[in-house]
Image: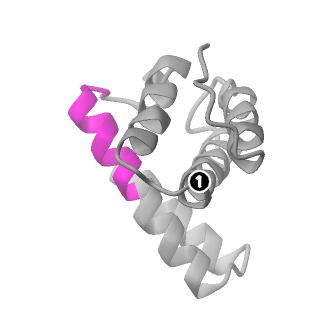
Amino acid sequence: MIRYADNFIEYLINVKKTSGNTVAAYRRDIGKLIHYLENYGVESLEHVSFTILNSYVMGLERMGNATASISRNVSAMKSFFSYLFYEKIIKRFIYPCFLHICMIKYKCNNKMRLFL
């Protein structure tokens, strides 16, 4: 999975011309996500589900991450999974629906739990 993350970062740098600060933040955020997925036992990005992503985001909140940090993590995940879909690395494009709900939640600074 880390190979896909590295390819995504290269895409951000070379194609999207993303700023250095954003690249560094996304590299860190996607790295943490991949570490979580591997510890969760996910062997392929195809096997990532709403439940796993929801658990990850709720874990960020439980660890005391600021709302802005969680929003950035969710934004990084949305960009990463969009990249994976458009590069035909994953076949299902279910993630943006979940991520859009999360982004609304954290941009509104709503502390209510998200259950899917």
- Please, what is the dominant secondary structure of the magenta stretch? helix
In the figure, residue 12 lies in which quadrant? bottom right
In the figure, residue 91 lies in which quadrant? top right
Residue 37 drawn in magenta: yes
Circle 1: residue type: Thr
Q: Residue at x 59, y 53 (%)?
A: 67
Which one is nearer the viewer's eye here, 83 or 66?
A: 66
Residue 6 drawn in magenta: no
The image shows residue 49, relative to residue 12, as above or below, that is above
Residue 94 x %, y %: 68, 24
Residue 53 x %, y %: 50, 30
Q: Which residue is drawn at 65% across and 30% down?
A: 95
Q: What element carries label 1?
A: helix
Toward the bottom, the furthest residue is: 20
Q: Which residue is drawn at 51% across and 20% down?
A: 49
Residue 96 x %, y %: 72, 34
Toward the top, the furthest residue is: 116
For label 1, the crowd category at 10 Å Cα-Cα, with few meaning under 14, some 14 to 19 and many 20 or more, is some
Apparent side of residue 62 relative to residue 50 in the rendered image (left or right): left
Q: Give the range drawn in magenta.
A: 31-42
The image shows residue 43, relative to residue 50, as above or below, that is below
Apparent side of residue 79 relative to residue 45 in the rendered image (left or right): right
Apparent side of residue 11 relative to residue 24 in the rendered image (left or right): right
Q: Residue at x 58, y 47 (%)?
A: 77
Which one is nearer the viewer's eye here, 12 or 112?
A: 112
Circle 1 residue? 67
